[in-house]
Amino acid sequence: MLKATFQLERWEGDFGKEYTDRNALSPDGLEKLYKDHYGITRTELNNLFLQGMERSLRILEVGSNVGNQLLCLQKMGFNNLYGIEPQDYAVELSKRRTEHINIIRGSAFDIPFKDGYFDLVFTSGVLIHINPKDIGRALREISRCSNKYIWGLEYYAEKYEEIVYRGEKNLLWKTDFAKLYQETLPAFELVKEQKFKYLSNDKITTGFLLKKKDKPEI
């Protein structure tokens, strides 16, 4: 079993619980948050990447917290949804907030599903909280479980930058995660990327969709 990282220990404790209590949003509350930040709702943003995909796709969110994003996907018609979350408190709360969504304990370093079990695996504001020295194994574990797509929405910078998060260091970084995925996982290719600037400041978030390359015919 992999040793817990400093960041995981913080998210599993009181620091993470406080985050969960701040961010348990209703579906309408999530839509308003994205509208206020980017000028589009989360549903509109999702459609930029998922338009035309079968609603029966088996989808996993890594770092699902209380299920905000999964509830949004469910409202859009996706009906085969899973989540993993390292914080017990958030897992229990998410089970009370959702129906017909399978959310269990797990982390990006140890996803408790077999190889290629999902059609699409995604993160939303999770990779930014993984130390750069650990990010490679997280990306490889995410890719292990996906048989087709990897999708993400994360803070963007041209190169790694550490950001002080709620007064603390060693908890948040931003970089070009789409590029990092391609460098780490040659079996996947970038099929779509779009950057979203905050309306109130100069921060940029990047959304990206990668697809597993077709195996060459023998």
Image: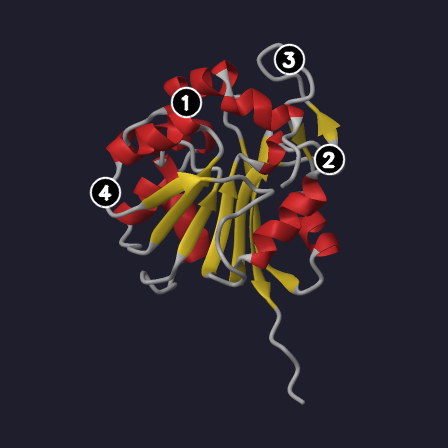
Mark 3 or mark 1: which comes first in sequence? 1
Residue at the spot of label 4: 99
SS at badge 2: loop
Distance from disc 3 to disc 2, alpha carbons, whole Å, reads 16 Å
Can the viewer see residue 208?
yes
Q: Amino acid at mark 3?
A: Glu
Labelled disc at residue 215:
none
SS at badge 3: loop
Is 60 located above or below residue 25 in the figure? Answer: below
Mark 4 or mark 2: which comes first in sequence? 4
Which residue occupies 65% across, 29% down? 5
Which residue occupies 64% across, 62% down? 188
Q: Amino acid at mark 1?
A: Thr
Q: Position of residue 147 (x, y in %)?
A: 52, 65
Residue at the spot of label 2: 132
Residue extending farthest front: 1
Q: Residues within 10 Å of mark 1 (few under 14, many from 20)?
A: some
Mark 1 or mark 2: which comes first in sequence? 1
Left or right, 102 with respect to 181, comes to left
Is 43 located above or below residue 119 in the figure? Answer: above
Distance from disc 4 to disc 3, alpha carbons, whole Å, reads 35 Å
Distance from disc 3 to disc 1, alpha carbons, whole Å, reads 17 Å
Distance from disc 1 to disc 2, alpha carbons, whole Å, reads 24 Å
Residue at the spot of label 3: 168
Colour style of the rendered protein structure: secondary structure
Q: Nearer the viewer, residue 210 or 136?
A: 136
